[in-house]
Amino acid sequence: MLSHTLERGVLVITVDQDPGIDGRATLTTHITHLVDAHQPTPVVIVLTERAAGPAAVSAVLRAHQWCARLGVLMCVVAHSAPVRRLLEDNADTSGPRLVVHARVDTAVTTAFTAAVQHPVRDVHVSPAPASASASASGERV
């Protein structure tokens, strides 16, 4: 479903297929665990053509909210213009803007440059109440 690498100090997570609505929470959890393990490393999430469905888009938007709470820079790559517009139109606007790119190399370079120019400040996140951090299935989303 997903793979990850480190490129130029940027965590690149590639989502290879849309997990369907039943797999959305699991995909979100996998992404947020990778973010947690590599923070404060900037994150680029790549949605392949096969992953450009509504559940994967939803999981990416949830991951964007998670990264914003942690103070982790995140951007997305989608080759499909309609998917890029969907991501931009539905992204949370209360925190850092979600930047959506068409190419992986551009996204990685942008994330690397932004991280070098604007190092992450210390972000202290107080734990959310158990009911706020768990979904109905008990997974963090």
Image (cartoon, helix red, strand yellow):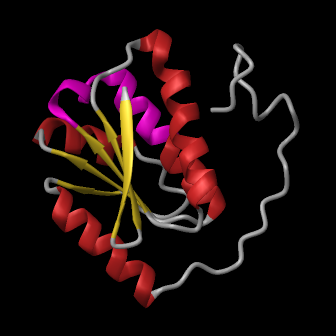
Q: Quadrant of residue 97?
A: bottom left
The magenta-colored residue range is 48-62
The residue at the point 88 percent across, 38 percent down is 129
**Outermost residue, top side:** 22
**50 part of magenta stretch:** yes
How many numbered discs? 0
Picture quarter containing residue 75? bottom left
Residue 66, compared with residue 27, is above or below; it is: below
**Residue 76 image point, x, y percent:** 31, 51
Majority secondary structure in the magenta region = helix
| Residue situated in front as seen by the camera: 88 or 113 | 113
User: In the current view of this chain or complex, which residue is farthest to the bottom?
Assistant: 117
Q: Is residue 90 left or right of residue 124?
A: left
Q: Is residue 139 above or below residue 47?
A: above
Q: Is residue 102 above or below residue 116?
A: above
Measuring 44% from the left and 40% from the top, which residue is drawn there? 61
Q: Quadrant of the C terminus?
A: top right
Question: Residue 26: x percent and y percent?
Answer: 54, 23
Q: Residue at x 64, y 57 (%)?
A: 69
- Identify the residue at image location x=54%, y=34%: 30
Q: Is residue 24 magenta?
A: no
User: Taking 68 as reference, is 9 above or below it?
Assistant: below
Image quarter in which the N terminus is found: top left
Direction from residue 85 to residue 21 in the image, left or right: right
